[in-house]
Image (cartoon, grey):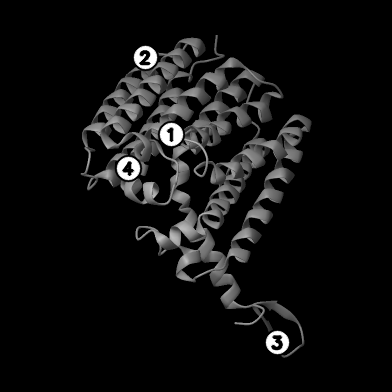
Amino acid sequence: MGTGQVTSGTGTQGPSPVTTARIMAVLGDIKFAHTVFALPFALLAAHLAFLRVGGYKLETLIAILICMVAARTAAMSFNRYMDRDLDAANPRTRDRSIPSGRTTPVDTLAVVIVCSIIFVGCCWYLGPLPLILSVPTIAFLLGYSTSKRFTLLTHLWLGAALAIAPVGAWIAITGGLDWIPVVLAVAVAFWVAGFDVIYSLQDVDFDRENRVFSIPAKTGEAPALWVSRGMHAVSVIALIIFGLWVGLGFQYWIALSLVAILLVIEHSLISPGDYSRLGIAFFTLNGVISIVLYLSVLLATSGFGQN
């Protein structure tokens, strides 16, 4: 395997299939489909921001999307790098790319560095304020990977990391901040934190044995579920405030009612000791929630600015 390079008959060098396979293994751990959790909220905030400034700019939207993908890939790859020893010890995660040997820690860090540079570069393109905020933003996103080692707020840290997306999109388009994306960010942060608590239930024994901070490991499974329910209640309240603040129409309120019902269903699928339906509760329902809210805002604002 050597250096990961081969010499062709002309004497030039290029990446070997082995190196390419290792990088693809890193990216395979990221699960691009999971961008469905944050991407619709970023698009939602971007839509409202474009309405505020008078219309869409395709190049700005593309830059925002690249920022999102690059930042998420950097953060998730760094998480895999930091958790490589834990992943190797946990039966649920030992097939991930680093512990399984499909890639190396160096390859994973290379992805982190490249994606971080891409993120900062796109922020530079979007304007002075996004550029100024880019370094502390990527530092905060990468910092999540250390949080489970010292604080129970790790769930909210993850929520805040995803909640940066709508705020960042708003700043990139308008050049400033407003309460609209902030309230939306609060909703996203508590929504993500709530389902992250549910997700961490499957590792409660492992987390206790390895001193990994999580609410279920600290409080027990049944109390943790109540914490998750409380977080989701805060999220729904924030979404109510958001809808009132923006002045959204009946389409949004129908969608929000559906979201509340889906959250109740999500919690009904999980009980202490029974996580057989966690995939439906965690991935499917939460993906539907974000998309439904985004589409409802598009419909509810279809007449904005028309007199």
Q: Nearer the viewer, residue 117 or 45?
A: 117
Residue assigned mark 2: 250
Q: Pointer 3: what residue?
A: 8
| Cα distance in 3D space between marks 2 and 1 | 25 Å
Label 1 and label 4: CA atoms lie apart by 15 Å
Mark nearer the N terminus (2 vs 3): 3
Q: In whole angstroms, how far apart are the C-alphas of marks 4 and 2?
A: 36 Å
State the SS at label 4. Answer: helix
- Mark pair 2, 3: CA separation: 64 Å
Q: Callout 3, which amino acid?
A: Ser
**Disc ID at residue 306:** none
**In percent of the image, x 49 and y 54: which residue is there?**
30
**Which residue in the protein does label 4 denote?**
201
Q: Are marks 2 and 3 in contact (CB under 8 Å)?
A: no
Q: Is residue 65 visible?
A: no
Q: Earlier in the sequence, mark 4 or mark 2?
A: 4
Residue 218, position as x, y percentages in the image: 37, 37
